[in-house]
Amino acid sequence: MSNLQNTLTHILEHERQLAYANEATIQQYVVLPILRALGWDDTDLASMEVSPEYQVESRRADYALYAPPIENPVVLIECKRWNAPITKHEEQICFYAYSGNIPLALITNGRHWRFYLPHWRASSLSDRIFCETDIAIEWYTLSLPSVSHFERPLYQSFLLLYQSRIHGRGLRRLYHGV
């Protein structure tokens, strides 16, 4: 996890510049480096683990994450500007994931990361939130020895992304019964 720690430290050192960044900048300088630090390969054309502009019906999600040998994505990601409120866009990513039969949806503005279980039977989207974190707030509390890594939302969130890559088939089985 030290690669992830270094990546997050680097991102947060540039938080002032990110405050004015557009979605594409957040994708390139925040989301992709975090995915790489978690072991997702966005450079291998053979596996295409990280696929940009994933089409769902007539719309597109920013990224689809694949866990070979599974043919369908295990995670869909929608990115927004650094200061954009992600709640405003939660319906969008949940619709994409639900329509594409994808077990996990993630929306992020780079700083806030929110994971959804789009197929979970719930009365509202907020009830489908699996976990969420604010990397700035969480990262500054990492030095506190009183809280274990496993109790921190930051750790739980990124561990989930890491495990999605390694155990994509289990993730799909867990949420779809496939």
Image (tube, rainbow, N blue to C red):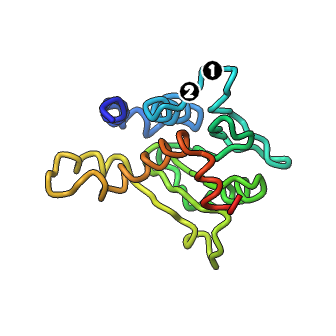
Residue bearing mark 2: 41
Between 123 and 166, which is closer to the camera in this rendering? Answer: 166
Q: Is the residue 8 above or below the residue 152 in the image? A: above
Query: In the image, residue 47 lies at what x, y percent?
Result: 67, 26
| Residue type, mark 1 in image | Asp
The residue located at (53%, 32%) in the rendering is 40
Q: Quadrant of residue 42?
A: top right
Q: What is the crowding at mark 1: few (fewer than 14 residues within 10 Å), some, or many (at least 20)?
A: few
Query: In the image, residue 114 lies at what x, y percent?
Result: 50, 56
Q: Quadrant of residue 14?
A: top left
Query: In the image, residue 154 lies at what x, y percent?
Result: 36, 50
| Residue type, mark 2 in image | Asp
Residue bearing mark 1: 44
- Check if mark 1's residue and mark 2's residue have beta carbons within 8 Å: yes
The residue located at (59%, 51%) in the rendering is 170
Q: Residue furthest left?
A: 145
Between 68 and 43, which is closer to the camera in this rendering? Answer: 68
Quadrant of the drawing holding the C terminus: bottom right
Disc 1 on helix, strand or loop? Answer: loop
